[in-house]
Amino acid sequence: MVHVSRRSFSRSASVLVGGAVLQVACAPQNPEQSYEAVADRTWQSPPTMPAAGLDNSLELVRYATLAPSSHNTQCWRYRVGISDIDILPDLERRCPAVDPDDHHLIISLGCATENLVLAAQALGQRAYAVWDAGKEGVHIALEPQDHRESALFHAMTSRQNTRSAYDGQPLSAQELELLARAANADEVQLRLITDRPGIERVLEYTIAANTLQMADVAFTAELKHWIRFNGDDAVASRDGLFSRCTGNPEVPGWLGKAGFSLLFRPGPENDKIAAHIRSSAGIAVFAGARPDKAHWVAVGRSYQRFALQATALGIRSAMVNQAVEVTTVRADFATALGMAPQRPDLVVRFGRGKAMPRSLRRPVSAVVM
């Protein structure tokens, strides 16, 4: 899952063209379709009044789509009924270079599942979610229950992968306990690393894996495909990685694509990773009990609760998954963390920092079958 600092157009576009020219080139023509306006509509918090029938299920899907996904591909489809919903993989949105076994894709379905379950509670329904191997997706059965909102539900429209430096301050023992409790699941192991030697150990493996990825032509081509170099392109697609979400400037698409290969270099990107990880209060590593799709869904659900609880506490988080994405690094990484023979599934840094621009989502009509 891409939500990491190094996946960005990492040099100032002013190297190639003046800032004033870029602002004119990227300026939206219609204020209602500006990136900011579309983002505000995407992440709005409507009243939690239960809707009727199919409309209620479609509202649950809308909340599910606010979940994170690898490269913000939004790699899901929804088969919707009044009393049940299936969340299925959209294999046309795979990322085979960074995610050859669809590991991150399935975890993304788990994140969407947790959002839907929490939203169902707030809209007066109980949701039972199971991995359905026959459908190769998550089946969710719905039944009426009392309307019950939670802090995690209310955090859903504020959660983001905040790809910036944090303030470097530690969290309290109580905050760490709340994060661990939110993520708790029998089928998922969570390792919270808050000591500086441990964080440096994670950084070492992350840098090693990132360097290998950046030397992979298929990886860099896939990444560039999902970058949206300006707001107009991001609004047109409603997916991908918008440059300003990582603190980088907007540039015309043609310029971003032309300059990407010249400016996306291991040295500056590794320096950014080091600064981001060292500014964090800690690292969370998630590992499913077994390396199969049902447990990857469980990991996604566990992580999503962690991220939502962090948001509710005013804590930022972001993925730093390089060490679990590169197979030649992953086993040694697991051993170094004392997690072997389990496969580490997700690596997340967390701490306090300022919000970044929010990513976009495709409309419900685009993901419902």
Image (cartoon, rainbow, N blue to C red):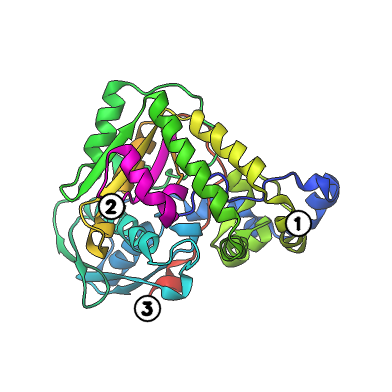
What residue is rendered at 37% in x and 46% in y?
332
Q: Secondary structure at mark 1?
A: helix
In this rendering, which labeled residue sits more in front, label 1 or label 3? 1
Q: Is residue 153 left or right of residue 235?
A: left
Q: Secondary structure at mark 3?
A: loop
Upstream in sequence: badge 1 or badge 3: 1
Do residues under tags 1 and 2 come within 8 Å of each other at their CB atoms?
no
Q: Amino acid at mark 3?
A: Met
Upstream in sequence: badge 3 or badge 2: 2
Q: Is residue 355 above or below residue 127?
A: above
Task: Using the rendered image of the protein, determine whether residue 46 is visible from the camera's viewpoint.
Answer: no
How far is disc 1 from disc 3 in space, using C-alphas? Answer: 38 Å
Residues 23 and 180: in front is: 180
Q: Amino acid at mark 1?
A: Gly
Do residues under tags 1 and 3 come within 8 Å of each other at their CB atoms?
no
How far is disc 1 from disc 2 in space, using C-alphas? Answer: 36 Å
Residues 75 and 121: in front is: 75
State which quadrant residue 89 falls in.
Answer: bottom left
What residue is rendered at 42% in x and 44% in y?
159
Q: Is residue 207 left or right of residue 307?
A: right
Q: Which mark is residue 299?
A: 2
Q: Which residue is mark 3?
A: 369
Q: Which residue is mark 1?
A: 259
Q: Amino acid at mark 2?
A: Val
Mark 2 crowdedness (10 Å alpha carbons): few <14, some 14-19, many ≥20: many
Q: Is residue 82 left or right of residue 262?
A: left
Do residues under tags 3 and 2 come within 8 Å of each other at their CB atoms?
no
Mark 3 crowdedness (10 Å alpha carbons): few <14, some 14-19, many ≥20: few
How far is disc 3 from disc 2 in space, using C-alphas? Answer: 25 Å
Q: Which residues are magenta?
A: 322-350
